[in-house]
Amino acid sequence: MIPLDEYPHIPYWFTLRQATSELDKSEVEIGGRKSLPRAILVFDEKYRLMGTARRRDIMRGLEPEFLLGRPIESRKTMFDVKVDPNLSELSYDKLLDGIRRQAERPISDVMRPIVATVDYEDHLVKIIYEMVDRGLSLLPVLKEGKVAGVVRSVDAFREIAEILL
């Protein structure tokens, strides 16, 4: 388990820009191995866990408004067009402006609700079951009803590797 004070977490009113900053500067070390967190925990003002936001949730949330509502295939092919290099600056600037505007949205707009937790005393088998059954790569760990930390699928896998190898 990674203790809560060593894992990135923010209040729900932080912007996507602030969440990006927190994730970008975060690094987790377990057993001498360093890794970048793939998600950030989101809390309310009473420090109750509300949800998580993965890097891809944040990136999806940064999509400029003018692209929203279009079918995904239409959005993808929009950037496959050959454009006059003198005009591409205009569209690129519009795209960046849209991303910057979206970055001011609160993280609560893109976070995912918590669907499962495990207890500090739970066995590794329960952790693995919850992750596999629910398709999760991160589980909050509760101790006496409060978030004590998180366990990631990579950490559970490492434990399994130690048992097997």
Image: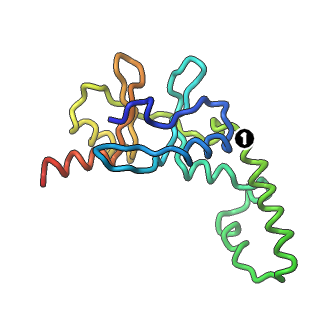
Depth check: give the residue in front, 93 or 125. 93
**Residue at (56, 17) in percent of width and height:** 46
The amino acid pointed to by label 1 is Arg
Compared to 71, does 154 lie above or below? Answer: above
- Quadrant including the C terminus: bottom left
Residue 97 lies left or right of residue 163; in this view the side is right
Label total for image = 1
Q: Badge 1, how many Cα within 10 Å: few under 14, some, many 20+? A: some
How far across and down, in percent of the image, does residue 161 sit?
19, 52
How far across and down, in percent of the image, does residue 30 sit?
32, 43
**Residue at (50, 44) in percent of width and height:** 26
Chosen colour scheme: rainbow
- Quadrant including the N terminus: top left
Q: Quadrant of residue 141?
A: top left
**Residue at (41, 20) in percent of width and height:** 146
How far across and down, in percent of the image, does residue 81 sit?
74, 80
Secondary structure under tag 1 reads loop
Compared to 40, does 117 lie above or below? Answer: above
Residue pointed to by mark 1 = 105
Q: Quadrant of residue 149?
A: top left
Residue 156 lies left or right of residue 75; in this view the side is left
**Residue at (41, 50) in percent of width and height:** 35
How far across and down, in percent of the image, does residue 74 sit?
70, 69
Depth check: give the residue in front, 163 or 23. 23
